[in-house]
Amino acid sequence: MLKHFEWAHDPTGTNTTEQGSCAVLCLACPQLGKNLPEDWESALPETCWLYAFFLVINANFCLACKNISSDQMDPGLNCGLAYFVEEQQYKTFLTDVGRSTGAGTVDCSWHNFKCPCGVSDLQKGEKYVNMDYLFFSTMQHMGDIAVLNVSYNIACQWSKHLWQHMGQYPSMIHLHHHDNKTIKFIVPKFHLPVHIKTCQITYSHNLLKGMGRMDGEVPKHQSITKAQSCFT
């Protein structure tokens, strides 16, 4: 992996490899310095959605069957260099870590790509402390994107105190200048009907401009595909 991403022969050594730098980025999503026009920041309000980043947050409990016996017997190899968060920092922050019950993940909503440093294991269910960490962690690799749309099945509750909670996390993953960004929180279409009417109006993909026909259910698509493969 280090060889393929041109870090294996770095004169300063492989230990200087930055977290998330070995992840394959979504080719179609906005990437600063790669596929954005020079004047993208001056886009008018009615066209700025063209340069928006679409993220979806969710958990996949089917992956619990991939549990290992222990980190000592079967250690991870990428150490936060690709899609999973850096394990030691993550578990040190959590302090009380039990057996993994699944995986939390942050994906590109449009193209099903995993985001850099946006995957980790879960302990005792899908807690805010895990999902917050993943969101802030992967945002460090998004660049200075001005428009962000975040889909999560409990976005209506999760987003209420998100920025206040950010102060409890390591400063290195804080999302600075978030007040200067246009950030919309949405509930995926499959989950939305069980929410109250206010949520169905406020957090609907169908009622927000620039959403297209996206459903915001990427991790669930992956769960269904995984389940189907187990029966074939």
Image (tube, grey):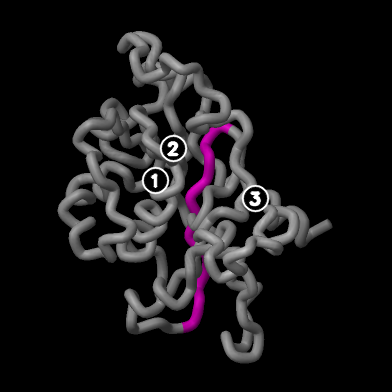
Which residue is pictured at 33% across the width and 57% down the height? 173
Which x, y percent locates residue 71? 57, 85
Q: In terms of sequence position, does the residue under pointer 2 or pointer 3 come before the other?
A: 2
Q: Which mark is residue 224?
A: 3
Evaluate if marks 2 and 1 touch, with contact meaning CB atoms under 8 Å apart.
yes
Which residue is pictured at 56% across the width and 70% down the height? 15
Kindly identify the amino acid type of the residue bearing the numbered disc 2. Answer: Pro
- Asked if residue 195 is among those painted magenta in the image, a careful observer would answer no
**Vertical placement of residue 26 versus 28, above or below:** below
Callout 3: SS: helix
Left or right of 96: which side holds 88? Answer: right
Q: Which mark is residue 153?
A: 1
**Vertical placement of residue 142 versus 50, above or below:** below
How packed mark 3 is, by other alpha carbons closer than 10 Å (few <14, some 14-19, many 20 or more), is few
Kindly identify the amino acid type of the residue bearing the numbered disc 3. Answer: Ile
Kindly identify the amino acid type of the residue bearing the numbered disc 1. Answer: Asn
**Vertical placement of residue 52 versus 42, above or below:** below
> How far is the residue under mark 2 from the one under mark 3?
15 Å
Q: Over which residues does the magenta segment extend?
A: 99-110
Which x, y percent locates residue 197? 26, 31
> How far is the residue under mark 1 from the one under mark 3?
16 Å
Q: Which mark is residue 188?
A: 2
Q: In terms of sequence position, does the residue under pointer 1 or pointer 3 come before the other?
A: 1
Which x, y percent locates residue 183? 30, 33
> How far is the residue under mark 2 from the one under mark 1?
6 Å
- Asked if residue 108 is among those painted magenta in the image, a careful observer would answer yes
Observer able to see residue 211: yes
Please tell me in which quadrant of the rendered image residue 178 appears: top left
